[in-house]
Image: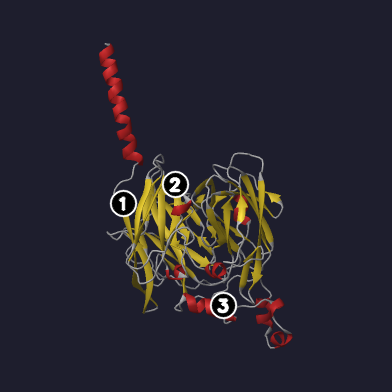
């Protein structure tokens, strides 16, 4: 009897390493190939970037607890580097020029780290202004313990201009084609303006780039992606704001939606039909398709401060005629606000701990000179913010400008704890928070991931014009 028990115990112990290996050890590396292709916009071919696997799969899908074992191959004619937006990984794997060499044309770079999170994330270039031409892709990490059955649909939002990103940036620096606030205009300019123009100029700055179109998954509403759905099924909309300089209002139309996650982190569900998403952020919505045949459900996203809209079409398999949806909404959208942020309650907030140290982050600059700063410093001439390891840190973000700024911290997830002096109980866990004009947001996080990490505005041209710094751990 003893021998049989001993043999059974030994066999079970021998099986443990094998079981662990199948779940967490690296498999054959997945290749992500960065290439260029043409898409059709208003009947014209436009060159864009594209990140896919050898079989054509767009982006990457992994499983929490397994390894991110990826080789990025650069098949373009320019150097690049890929950042894994929202993932908590070792500093050397962050995919920014400050911590790894650029991937030169024809070369490759290997990434290898354990996936600690599950949710909707994304990947994008952190080199030059390549994001404007969509050097980006979805990055979805699934939870092996989540047995919820949904039809996943990705909506990656973007803004489009036929101009090169370099031309756009040059024009912004020169003040061309840029809205001005009343305070930035001289008396002669004011006298020559109509009353309607004066009224527009008096409003806060919502956009600093005049885009030609908005896209979802590389398509405009003239040729939208049509996703076939079944009556009665649940659809999970994984919405990624991959735009360069546009915030959005997402409208689920006649479908009532539940907001269940923000920036890849679960929240207590919020019901509604119109939702806000800042640049760099992600939201996950659940919609249930009604038990109706030949049904069509547009999911639209309208750019903040514009009439432009984009989206996808959910259609049952027997709906053969898809109506035309205009790229122009009847009315211009207003400004995003904190109304949604106040409602977000984290499913897994930070454990309560005393604050060990405080960082102050002042957002400064203006549209007239197109200079954007953090703590009166412009990238790359910055002094890093210093923190100590294993501390609870409070970051106070003061926006002293006329524009909202989506502030993204690499390598960490933080909790929104206060907005304009009012505490937020169990606020959303985020990696990117949209800080409204002339307001203050406080967030907290734990310094449990040593290294030098970027902190910046995710508006591409604000970042390029100086609104970026680093957070470094004391050695």
Residue 375 image position (x, y, % from top left)? 66, 62
Q: Earlier in the sequence, mark 3 or mark 2?
A: 2
- Applied colour scheme: secondary structure
Mark 3 to mark 2 CA distance (whole Å): 38 Å
Mark 1 crowd level (few <14, some 14–19, many ≥20, 10 Å Cα): some
Percent across and percent down for residue 12 are 30, 25
Which image quadrant is residue 463 in? bottom right
Q: Which residue is mark 3?
A: 172
Mark closer to the observer (3, 2): 3
Q: Residue placed at 53% from the left, 50% from the top? A: 412
Q: 180 or 251: nearer the eye?
A: 180
Please say whether residue 289 is visible from this viewpoint. no
Q: Is residue 253 left or right of residue 148?
A: right
Earlier in the chain: of badge 2 and badge 1, it is: 1
Q: CA distance from mark 2 to mark 1?
A: 20 Å
Relative to 206, is 55 above or below? Answer: above
For mark 1, what is the residue?
A: 29
Which of the two marks, 2 or 1, is nearer to us in this view?
Answer: 1
Q: Quadrant of the N terminus?
A: top left
Residue nearest the viewer, comparing 34 with 330: 34
Give the residue number, with chain letter if any, for mark 2.
Answer: 118
Can you give x and y, in whole percent of width and height, for residue 46 in the image?
38, 76
Image-quadrant location for residue 196 = bottom right
| Nearest to N terminus: mark 1 or mark 3 | 1
User: Is disc 1 placed on a helix, strand or loop?
Assistant: loop
Circle 3 SS class? helix
Rendered view: 5 above or below 80: above
| Label 2 secondary element | loop
Residue 246 in picture, x, y percent from top left: 53, 67
Q: Residue furthest front?
A: 475
From this view, report whether residue 79 is shown above or below residue 26: below
Query: In the depicted view, which residue is nearer to us: 175 or 91?
Result: 91
């Amino acid at each position: 009897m003893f021998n049989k028990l001993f043999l059974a115990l030994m066999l079970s112990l021998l099986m443990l390493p094998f079981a662990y290996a199948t779940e967490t050890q690296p498999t054959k590396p997945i290749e992500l190939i960065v290439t260029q292709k043409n898409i059709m916009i208003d009947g014209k071919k436009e060159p864009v970037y594209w990140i896919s696997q050898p079989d054509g799969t767009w982006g990457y899908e992994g499983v929490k607890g397994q390894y991110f074992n990826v080789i990025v191959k650069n098949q373009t004619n320019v150097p690049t580097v890929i950042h894994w937006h929202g993932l908590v990984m070792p500093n050397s794997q962050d995919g920014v020029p400050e911590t790894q060499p650029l991937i030169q044309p024809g070369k490759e770079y290997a990434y290898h780290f354990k996936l600690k999170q599950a949710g909707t994330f994304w990947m994008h270039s952190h080199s030059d202004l390549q994001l404007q031409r969509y050097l980006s892709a979805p990055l979805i990490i699934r939870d092996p313990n989540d047995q919820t059955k949904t039809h996943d649909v990705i909506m990656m939002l973007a803004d489009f201009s036929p101009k090169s990103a370099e031309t756009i940036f040059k024009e912004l620096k020169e003040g061309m084609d840029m809205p001005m606030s009343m305070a930035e205009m001289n008396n002669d300019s004011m006298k020559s303006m109509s009353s309607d123009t004066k009224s527009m100029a008096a409003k806060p700055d919502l956009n600093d780039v005049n885009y030609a179109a908005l896209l979802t998954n590389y398509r405009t509403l003239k040729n939208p992606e049509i996703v076939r759905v079944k009556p009665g099924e649940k659809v999970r909309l994984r919405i990624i704001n991959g735009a360069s300089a546009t915030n959005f209002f997402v409208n689920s139309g006649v479908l009532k939606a539940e907001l269940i996650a923000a920036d890849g982190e679960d929240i207590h569900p919020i019901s509604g039909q119109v939702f806000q998403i800042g640049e760099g952020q992600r939201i996950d919505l659940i919609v249930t398709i009604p038990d109706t045949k030949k049904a069509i459900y547009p999911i639209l996203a309208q750019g903040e401060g514009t009439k432009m809209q984009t989206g996808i079409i959910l259609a049952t398999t027997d709906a053969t005629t898809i109506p035309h949806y205009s790229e122009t909404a009847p009315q211009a959208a207003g400004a995003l606000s904190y109304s949604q942020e106040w409602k977000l309650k984290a499913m897994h907030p930070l454990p309560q701990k005393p604050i060990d140290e405080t960082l102050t982050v002042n957002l400064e600059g203006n549209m007239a000179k197109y200079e954007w700063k953090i703590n009166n410093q412009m990238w790359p001439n910055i002094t890093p913010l210093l923190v100590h390891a294993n501390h609870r840190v409070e970051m106070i973000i003061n926006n002293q400008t006329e524009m909202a700024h989506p502030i993204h911290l690499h390598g960490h997830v933080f909790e929104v704890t206060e907005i304009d002096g009012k505490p937020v109980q169990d606020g959303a866990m985020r990696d990117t928070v949209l800080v409204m004009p002339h307001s203050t947001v406080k967030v907290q996080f734990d310094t449990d991931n040593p290294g030098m990490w970027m902190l910046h505005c995710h508006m591409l041209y604000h970042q390029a014009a100086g609104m970026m710094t680093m957070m470094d751990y004391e050695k």
